Image (cartoon, rainbow, N blue to C red):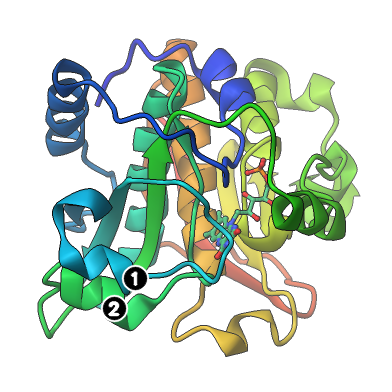
């Protein structure tokens, strides 16, 4: 992973692109991207397989679809995993790291967890029978203007907005919001999490600080994941982990993710514990 990634500019530059210019990515740039992707990893001990796909190189391209959501894209990248605990978190972490890198290269992306022909892409990307394809992204140069369906969609899900701190970050219990003063050297990392993308912009991350340990919880929007073959918001949790990890690393704060502890914190309804981050002493 490229630890020198200027995380703040990448996070602010990355925005879902659904309308692509009729322009291929240059060969040298494509080689760099492939190398970056093959060097990424994740801290959740899960193996994520990445698959590049070029709609132009394949007759299959005609049949693969995104329900009109993505227009003009030629390049796609898919992430497949074995359906085991934390695999979706790993996909979120690793694919988001790649998307932030692409944003730095002025290449647009868009997380697709729902609006794509999962069966068709699974076949085209030769996904193994014991694996799932939870998400793909188109990537390429953005067209100057958004297409109409994209404008409507962004307005509907209020894609440009993010929750305030007091809805996302807590200290000791879920009744007490964490202030920036209390967050101290972690203020920047939490702000990077706050700006992260999430499925339908639901922002399910809830982070609670207790005894110096950062516990990451998922607010499960009731019924939301039922329409997916898996808990899509686990990917959002992995995205939050990537933003937190890249931001702390950039500030020289060292630590690691753990997931086999019990924080012993009363959880409000629909909240689930997922993992924690502990600072190295
Ligand atoms: C896990 C995940 C799945 C997503 N699935 C879709 C999708 O199927 N179709 C789509 O158009 N956007 C999808 N999005 C994009 C979100 O709608 C978008 O990230 C969010 O509205 C915030 O907007 P922004 O990315 O421009 O900041 C997905 C995002 C995430 C993180």
Q: Secondary structure at mark 2?
A: helix
Q: Secondary structure at mark 1?
A: loop
Residue 147 located left or right of residue 278: right
Query: Quick check: which quadrant has ligand 1?
Result: bottom right
Q: Position of residue 147 (x, y in %)?
A: 69, 47
**133 and 86: which is toward the camera:** 133
The answer to the question of whether label 2 and label 1 lie on touching residues, with beta carbons closer than 8 A, is yes
36 vs 199: above or below: above
Q: Which residue is mark 1?
A: 64
Residue 244 located left or right of residue 268: left
- Is the distance from the Cβ of mark 2 to the nearest ligand 1 atom less than 8 Å? no
Q: Position of residue 178 (x, y in %)?
A: 82, 37
Q: Position of residue 26 (x, y in %)?
A: 23, 21
Q: Quadrant of the N terminus?
A: top left
**93 and 249: which is toward the camera:** 93
Identify the residue at horizontal 45%, vertical 52% (top origin).
238
Query: What is the spatial separation of the Cα atoms under label 2 and label 1, in whole angstroms?
Result: 6 Å
Q: Looking at the image, can residue 44 be seen? A: no
Earlier in the chain: of badge 2 and badge 1, it is 1
Q: Position of residue 174 (x, y in %)?
A: 81, 58
Crowding at mark 2 (Cα within 10 Å: few <14, some 14-19, many 20+): some
Identify the residue at horizontal 53%, vertical 31% (top origin).
142
Crowding at mark 1 (Cα within 10 Å: few <14, some 14-19, many 20+): some
Q: Which residue is mark 2?
A: 120
Q: Quadrant of the C terminus?
A: top left
Which dot marks residue 18? none
Looking at the rendering, which quadrant does residue 116 occupy? bottom left
146 vs 222: above or below: above
Q: Looking at the image, can residue 228 be seen? A: yes
- Is the distance from the Cβ of mark 1 to the nearest ligand 1 atom less than 8 Å? no
Identify the residue at horizontal 64%, vertical 26% (top origin).
144
């Amino acid at each position: 992973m490229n630890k020198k990634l200027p995380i703040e500019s990448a996070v602010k530059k990355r925005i879902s692109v659904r309308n692509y210019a009729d322009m291929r990515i240059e060969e040298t740039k494509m080689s760099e991207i492939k190398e970056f992707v093959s060097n990424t990893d994740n801290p959740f001990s899960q193996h994520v397989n990445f698959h590049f796909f070029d709609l132009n190189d394949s007759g299959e391209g005609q049949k693969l679809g995104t329900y009109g959501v993505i227009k003009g894209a030629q390049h796609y990248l898919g992430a497949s995993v074995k359906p085991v605990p934390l695999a979706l978190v790993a996909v979120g972490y690793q694919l988001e790291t790649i998307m932030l890198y692409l944003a730095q290269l002025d290449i647009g992306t868009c997380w697709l967890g729902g609006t794509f022909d999962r069966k068709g892409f699974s076949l085209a990307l030769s996904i193994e029978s014991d694996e799932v394809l939870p998400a793909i992204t188109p990537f390429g140069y953005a067209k100057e203007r958004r297409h109409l369906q994209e404008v409507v969609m962004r307005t509907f899900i209020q894609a440009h907005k993010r929750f305030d701190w007091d809805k996302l970050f807590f200290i000791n219990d879920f009744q007490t919001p964490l202030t920036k003063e209390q967050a101290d050297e972690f203020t920047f990392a939490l702000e990077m999490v706050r700006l992260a993308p999430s499925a339908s912009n639901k922002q399910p991350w809830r982070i609670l600080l207790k005894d110096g340990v950062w516990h990451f919880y998922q607010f499960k929007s009731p019924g939301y994941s039922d329409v997916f073959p898996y808990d899509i918001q686990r990917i959002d949790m992995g995205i939050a982990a990537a933003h937190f990890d890249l931001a702390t690393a950039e500030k020289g704060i060292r630590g690691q993710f753990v997931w086999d502890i019990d924080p012993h914190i009363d959880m409000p309804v629909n909240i689930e514990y997922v993992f924690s981050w502990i600072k190295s002493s």
